[in-house]
Image (tube, rainbow, N blue to C red):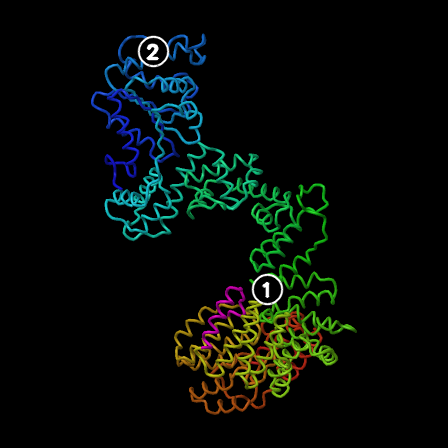
Amino acid sequence: MHAVNGDLYHREREISLLQEVIAGLALGRPAVVTVHGPRGMGKSALLNVVPRLLPEGALVLRARCHPSESGFPYSMVRQLFDPVLGAAGRGETFIPAEAHGSSGEAAGPTHEALLHLLSTTRSLAADRPVAVLVDDLQYADEPSLRWFSYIARRLDDLPVLLAATLPDSAAARLTEELGPLPYLNRLWPEPLCSTCTTELVDRAFDSPVDQGLAALCDALAHGNPMVLHDLVNRLRREHVPPGAPDPQQVLPIGAQALSETVLAWLDEDDPAAGELLTQLAVLGPDTDPAMCGALSQHGEVQVLQARDALVRAGLLEAGPPARFPHAAVRPAVLARVPAEDRLHLHGRAATVLARLGAPARQTAEHLVKAGCEWGLDVLRDAGAQAAAAGDHASAARYLRRALALLDGPPPGDASAPERPGETPHAETFHELTVRLASVELHRDLDACARQTVAAADSAPGPVGRAEVLARLASPALVASLEGAQPFVRACGELAALAAPPREPLLRLTAQALLTGHRAGVRAAARLAARGPLDPAARSFSGALAAAAAATGRTGTAQRLAARVEVAQGAAQEAVTAGWPAGPIGAALALIWTGAPAAARDLATRVLTTARAADDGATVLLARLVRAEAHHREGRFSTAYADAEAGLALARRLNAAALTSAALSCAARALVGLDRADDAAEVLREDRSAGDLHPFVRALSLQARGEVAAARGDHTAALGLFLDCGHRLALRGITNPACLPWRTQAARAYRALGEEAAAATILNGGPRTPAVTPHPASAPHDPERPTLTPAEQRVVELVLRGHSSLEVSERLFLSKRTVDTHLGRVYRKLGIHSRHELAAALSTP
């Protein structure tokens, strides 16, 4: 549809009606026209068209009402008649004196005053048509409003057009009074259609605009011409290109236009609708009307009326449920709500919901957003519900807030605020910490490690600590030293008991074995042998298989790995029951004992089961194990695909150590695909700290060495491969099949022309001392003493500046054992203190 009279769009029907009633004035037919609708819909623009449609010589009387003038009697009438009567120089008023009290205040319109005004109107219309146009009639003073109704019912023989604009909310009273009039016409201007919106936007930009921009303007303005004009003007001021706009640039501008036009109108015209809109923006558009009524202390009927007003204004879709018509509306409303008011509204909603017995999660959302100092029971229940539904992010939020409340007044403290819906409870810091750690296991492994340490420290006694850690035992946690420590300590404590509980000991021992420690192995082996081959026993067997394979005991490792799959679906059963250490350990053992195909199949079954059980940590481990199996089989493309999938999951689970492992697996696969430069780029993302499992650190060093060798830097590659071997030796991983660093170091030696060194390293020649060897180091001195792996681990930490006590804590040894190792090292090297250690080791 095209513009009418140059500046109106989509108003053909309304213009046609106005033309019809104005044509009737020449025949002595009066007309009363009321134009209804929300602000900005073009009511005043229609009124402005009337003078251009009138015949020449017609008299136009105009008035615009305002709330500030509603207390002055006849202010609207004076606006209408002063220009024609006040300028006549008669020196007399057309408002009779009887219309005023003695003090000059309004005494109400008398019948004589109304007759006098009617007579004045008749005299003005005696020889020409008269159009009386009133904007915003709802703000007229009471005498003027009474006059409007009075004269509208007495126009039968006068060529008078009486037209006024007013919103729908103020039309009821006038409609009741004027309803029977045969010459009454009501107009409701419709929202602009999309075609008219496009034409108007094209005209504003003076060029055809992108259809996406036109559609976005139509959605934001919801057909309101004034909002559309304001929006287009803002877009032009911000220099938004009409041909290729960025929606992310347009949306904030549209939100601002809404907030400064329609929303401001609501505050003036319909405060109840504005209040409801604020509530729906803060609390969510699906909030029940009864809740909004309780928050605003309005009745449900009034809330529903306000909701209808919002629908008419285009700020809500007709429900239920009520939804915002466009994503920009809610941010626009929220931008106008002070933070203090938001907090108050959320807190009030939490109180009302708790009293109404609403679902815990619904109440907890408002508790968290308001920062209320009550609601421990609600938050705890909401955390359990969210975790059961798989919404671990929300569960963590609720439980963290519950833990924060423990710092506040106790539930029975008289100074504490009222706690609606809360009952006395015995929830402790320890119990909440365990709950939070269980949730973080599904979403943030590094946070889970920290919470696991806190849960272990707050547990009551060795058995209680073991039971807690058994619930949290996941092989993914032991990839970092922080995550491994509580399991190793608790395992040692539990094994020292006269009658340790079977399942916790087997589970903790499996965790400890995967860290490279053998705390509790003997006691766990005895319990596993005496009991059935259940998931607990298979979990222990799988981890023990990995430990055996790491030290080169191939036969033992294969026998133990076979126990994990002794029954059909045993691996799936173990993962479903929460015992993933067994299948993961067995798969590693199979890889390290030369059976990568069997390991791949086992990892695939674990992956499928863990995915179905929503166990992201085990899915991640299965991905990395399968990537390693593919790599051993020479399937570098599939190895890279698994590593990439594992990397994405490791980042999502915030697992720094396993992210490093995934990056290393991806880089090694890229080297196998002859993409060494891409592999180097991948490894630049590895910024992991030193808190890594020694095998993960060694894997990273090996991957860097492979990349360096592939790019021709054999000197750097040799240093990395030798450092990799050193890291493995520190944890007692002696099987060359775990990571083939010796073969790779020999290749680097040969590339550097060191054939003798290559032969020595391949033959498992003398070990290097506990310092990182230099690739250009001199041939090994056969008279130089050799340190055992245990002594090398102790010496390395001492050289880093750690005390004997700190070394014992990091290696999970007693201080006495550390001192014994140091004494042996001193005797071998012929020194007397740790201050001489560095010099003795660096002496050729």
Residue on which the image places disc 1: 441
- In the rendered structure, which segment of residues is drawn in magenta? 638-659
- Residue 212, x across and y down, in percent: 32, 51
Quadrant where the C terminus lies?
bottom right
Question: How far apart are the alpha carbons under marks 2 and 1?
Answer: 85 Å
- Label 1 neighbour load within 10 Å: few <14, some 14-19, many 20+: many
- Label 2 neighbour load within 10 Å: few <14, some 14-19, many 20+: some
Quadrant where the N terminus lies?
top left
Residue shown at 41% from the left, 71% from the top: 681
Horizontally, residue 257 falls left or right of residue 557, namely left
Above/below status of 280 relative to 32: below
Q: Nearer the viewer, residue 17 or 453?
A: 17
Residue on which the image places disc 2: 94
Residue 836 appears in view: no
The nearer-to-camera label among 2 and 1 is 2
Q: Is mark 2 on a helix, strand or loop?
A: loop
Q: Is mark 1 on a helix, strand or loop?
A: loop
Residue most extreme to the left? 56
Q: Nearer the viewer, residue 801 or 320?
A: 320
Residue 144 appears in view: yes
Residue shown at 42% from the left, 87% from the top: 751
- Residue 481, x across and y down, in percent: 60, 70
Q: Is tag 2's residue or tag 1's residue first in the polypeptide sequence?
A: 2
Residue 111's tag is none
Horizontally, residue 354 falls left or right of residue 714, namely right
Q: Is residue 100 magenta?
A: no
Main secondary structure type of the part rendered in magenta: helix
Horizontally, residue 750 falls left or right of residue 823, namely left
Looking at the picture, which amino acid does disc 2 mark? Phe
- Residue 706, x across and y down, in percent: 45, 80
Count of numbered marks: 2
- Residue 236, x across and y down, in percent: 30, 44
